[in-house]
Amino acid sequence: MPLRQDCERATLAPALPRDGAPATGSPLAPGSRRRPTLEDVARAAGVSRGTVSRVINGGHSVRPAVMAMVNEAIARLGYSVNHAARNLARGRTGSVAFVISEHQEHLFEDPNFGLFVRVFSRELRRRGIHLLVTAAQDQGEESFLGDYLSAGHVDGALLALPHAGEPLLTQLLDRHVPLVVLGRPDNERDAARASWVAIDDERAAFLVASHLAARHRGPIATITGPLDTSSGRERLAGFRRAAGARFSEQLVAVGDWSSTSGEIGAEALLQREPKLAGLFVASDLMALGALRVLRRHGRRVPEDVGVAGFDNSASALSADPPLTTVSNPIEATALEAVAILGRLIEGEEAPQHVLLDTELFLRASL
């Protein structure tokens, strides 16, 4: 009986034309609550289903007049692509995960993560893909996420640069999950086989720290990012190179990218060196914390202590005084990462490595 019903429906349905021939039958009735289909658009425009499909996918080999008729029918019927059906037919989920290996308190404080989410959401939405955002705070959560992401629940992943020793990146690479890392992976083997988008942290830190060292002749110090990340270590290396003979391990405080760690680091450095003349902070957010401490201690910026940050975030402009910093092109990184991930999902196998340029912004804090 089910077979007979299917046959009857097939007999009654209007025949679809070959590509290039006009569709027959009536378009979707006005006021209908049924979701318009590709066939409805074809009938309304008087073209074939294949022509509508070509218009939706870029309009290749379609005459402008025909394209205009199809677009008018799409607008009139309120047609939208059924991404769920398309993904199902292609064996896709229509979802991409943004995984952040960070404690939640830092996740919500750091403006860079928010910018990544906004750009990822916008660009993936244009491709009909939904963004899932998740955080992994420890190895137990990373192991769970590794199993989840590699079980086919998402088409790919965007991974904020993990800390050294965290297994998630290696696990996903071993299981051939399409992914792009934001930043250069710490592990050399993973860095070679993963796709990533990064900046030259050492060079950028050297650039801004050199200006700090040139303008302030007394003792200079730094508050680093986490030293179990490549960006934290490379920014410290850039400062060390810029400081030269003035570098001292006693004038290095380790932070964790949060403003609180900037305050703690500045307090420790002032206790070790009351005559501190310059301070390079490895993120603008930590620099804001350091500025608060210098103000509490009555140290004027830049007259007594020159301060430089890293990221060129919105907080650098709103700081008092505005903060000298070096750019970390978050939006460009996000756009490049989405483009690479799209190619990997489509089957491109070769890992892609992109190094973006940075720019120095000299402001009143020096």
Image (spheres, rainbow, N blue to C red):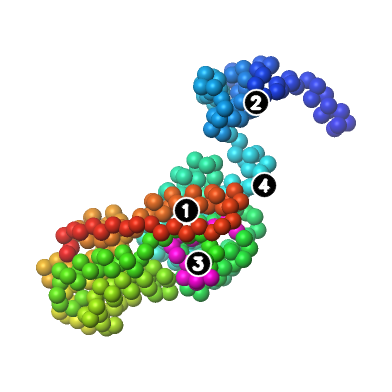
Most foreground residue, 260 or 343: 343
Q: Nearer the viewer, mark 4 or mark 3?
A: 3
* Numbered tag placed on residue 302 in the rendering: none
Please state the extent of the stretch shown in magenta in the rendering.
177-189
Instruction: Determine whether the residue tagged by mark 1 lies in a helix, strand or loop.
Output: helix
Sequence order check: which comes first, mark 2 or mark 1? Answer: 2
Comes first in the chain, label 1 or label 4: 4
Amino acid type, mark 3:
Ala
**In percent of the image, x 19 and y 72: which residue is there?**
213
Is tag 3's residue or tag 2's residue first in the polypeptide sequence?
A: 2
What residue is shown with label 4?
91
Determine if the magenta segment contains residue 199: no
Quick check: 141 left or right of 236?
right
Task: Check disc 2 and report the residue beneath it.
Answer: 49
Which residue lies under the disc numbered 1? 337
Q: Residues within 10 Å of mark 1 (few under 14, many from 20)?
A: many
Q: Nearer the viewer, mark 3 or mark 2?
A: 3
